[in-house]
Image (cartoon, rainbow, N blue to C red):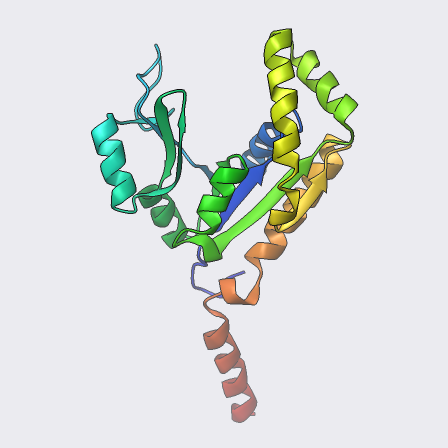
Amino acid sequence: MTHGQPRRGLLLILSSPSGAGKSTMARMLMAWDPTIRFSVSATTRKPRPGEVHGQHYWFHDHDSFRALVASGGMLEHAEVFGNFYGSPRAPVEQAMSEGRDTLFDVDWQGGQQIRNSALGKDAVSVFILPPSIAELENRLKGRAQDSAEVIAGRMAKSRDEISHWAEYDYVLVNREVDETFADLKAIVTAERLRRDRQPGLNDFVRDLNTEFEAR
C-alpha cells in the first residue's frame, strides 16, 4: 500500500554458501512477484554462444568497465580469474524510481559493497544458512554438476562465506524450501510496508485529519 504514490524499490540482497539455496530462493521470489527484477551483471569476459547483451550480462571491455567503476556506475564489482564482474547502478535506480525491487544474488563481499553504496539505505540483506555442513555437502553432490575437486573447493569457501552471517539484516536456516520461502516472503512484505518506504503516508494522514476537522 503506497496511498497513491509509488514507493521506492528495494535492493534485495541474497547471499549463502554454494548449495544452501540462494538461487532457488531467488527463482521462487521472482515467480511469486514478477515485478521484481533480477540484477543483470556487467562483465569483461567474452560472450558465450547464445548469450545476449543486456539479458544474460552487460558485456564491456576492460577500459569501459573501469570507467564505470571510477564514475560510480557500479554498485559492486570484483575481479575473478582475470575478468571483472559487477552490478550496474543505472538500471537499479530506474527500477527503484518505478517502485520495483531489484534482486541481487551476490556473495558477502558484493553484499557489503551494495550496503555501503549510495543506494545502501534501500538495501535489505538476507543470508541463507544450510541446516548442517553434512547436508550442504550432500546438496552439492546431489547436483551432479561438479567434480569432486570443485565440490571440495566450494566446501572450503563456504566456511569463509558463513563467517559473515552476522553482517546481514536477516538470517534464514534453509531446512525445508517451502518454509524458508514463506519466511523470505514475509521479510519482503514487511520491508515494503515500513513507514519510511511509503511516501504517500504524510498526505494520507493529513487527509484523515481534514476529515476530522470537517465533522
Residue at horizontal 38 percent and vertical 34 percent from the top:
86
Task: Work out whether residue 54 or residue 141 is closer to the camera in this orientation and state it.
Answer: 141
At horizontal 66% and vertical 36% (from top left) the residue drawn is 162
Residue 11 in view: yes
Foreground residue among 21 and 192: 21
Q: Quadrant of residue 153?
A: top right
Task: Name the foreground residue: 97 vs 206.
Answer: 97
Image check: 65 left or right of 37?
left
As drawn, 92 above or below 84: below
Residue 18, image quadrant: top right
Q: Percent from the top left, x then y, of residue 23?
A: 58, 28
Q: Quadrant of the C terminus?
A: bottom right
Q: Is residue 33 visible?
A: no
Residue 15 lies, in percent from the top left, at: 58, 37
Compared to 1, does 46 lie above or below?
Answer: above
Q: On the rendered structure, is 211 left or right of 155? A: left
Q: Residue at x 70, y 44 (%)?
A: 183
List x then y, in percent, for residue 75.
Answer: 38, 44
Q: Quadrant of the N terminus?
A: bottom right
- The spot of residue 166 in percent (x, y) is 65, 47
**Relative to residue 140, is residue 96 drawn left or right?**
left
Which residue is located at x 53 percent, y 34 percent? 107
107, above or below 89, in the image: above
